[in-house]
Image (spheres, rainbow, N blue to C red):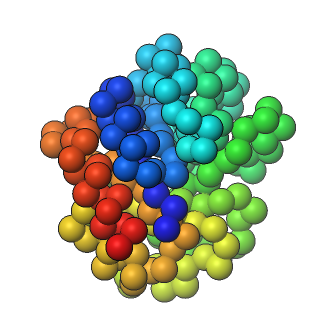
């Protein structure tokens, strides 16, 4: 089970995720997010992460030139785009040397009825709300690599992963003690539950 811990902003949170065995850690560069971090603040955190762990920059409806500039300045290896960005943005990111993740809501994925070429992160119907999935929201999960996200916690990740059989899971608010404040203990608990 591939596990991504997203919205990290402190050394303690990064170290907890890496030490607990996360496969990827995410840094949010999307304006308006309570988990927003600047590239200059993220760069030393990214530098702490061992090569075996994927580092992901999260962007939402931002110009692709801005995305690439922030990704380079922070040092992340992967660009995750939310917000129905055009295919050209993903091509530009790949051409610039980044791996990519396409994030869509369950509703958007189902309505689109297409096979995206990128790895997918499928979020709950209301992304960022912390409201977990209803299995009825995703009647036909992707057959290729995809991450389940949206309202996951140490208490429900096992059951939801069993229901959907994703390639992996993504967590942010579910391992926080307050909005934007990661709890190292909850990070460890989430990793243990996701892998059990």
> Is 118 displayed left or right of 130 in the figure?
right
Foreground residue among 134 and 146: 146
x, y percent for residue 87: 75, 50
**Residue 55, horizontal then vertical, whole percent:** 56, 38
Residue in the picture at 35% in, 73% down: 196
Image: 186 above or below 112: above
Task: Tell me if residue 84 comes above or below residue 28 in the rendering.
Answer: below
In the current view of this chain or complex, which residue is farthest to the right?
95
Please identify the residue farthest to the left as the structure is shown. Answer: 177
In the image, what residue occupies the spot 44% across and 63% down? 169
The foreground one among 74 and 22 is: 22
Q: Residue at x 56, y 44 (%)?
A: 53
Query: What is the tally of numbered marks visible in this picture?
Result: 0
Whether residue 79 appears in this view of the structure is no
In the displayed structure image, the side of residue 145 where residue 136 appears, left or right:
left
**Lateral position of residue 165 relative to residue 129, left or right:** right
User: Residue 139 at what x, y percent from top left?
Assistant: 48, 85
Up/down of 133 relative to 16, above or below: below
Measured as percent of width and height from the top left, residue 137 is found at 41, 78
Q: Is residue 94 visible?
A: yes
């Amino acid at each position: 089970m591939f596990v991504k811990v997203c919205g990290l902003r402190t050394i303690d949170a990064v170290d907890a995720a890496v030490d607990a065995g996360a496969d990827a850690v995410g840094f949010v560069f999307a304006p308006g997010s309570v988990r927003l971090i600047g590239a200059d603040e993220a760069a030393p955190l990214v530098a702490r992460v061992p090569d075996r762990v994927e580092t992901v920059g999260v962007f939402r409806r931002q110009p692709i030139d801005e995305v690439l500039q922030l990704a380079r300045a922070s040092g992340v290896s992967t660009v995750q785009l939310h917000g129905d960005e055009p295919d050209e943005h993903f091509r530009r990111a790949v051409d610039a040397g980044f791996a990519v993740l396409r994030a869509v809501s369950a509703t958007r994925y189902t309505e689109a009825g297409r096979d995206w070429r990128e790895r997918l992160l499928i979020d709950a119907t209301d992304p960022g709300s912390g409201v977990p999935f209803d299995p009825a929201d995703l009647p036909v999960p992707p057959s290729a690599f995809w991450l389940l996200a949206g309202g996951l916690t140490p208490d429900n990740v096992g059951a939801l992963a069993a229901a959907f059989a994703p390639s992996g899971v993504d967590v942010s608010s579910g391992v926080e003690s307050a909005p934007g404040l990661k709890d190292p203990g909850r990070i460890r608990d989430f990793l243990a539950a996701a892998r059990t």
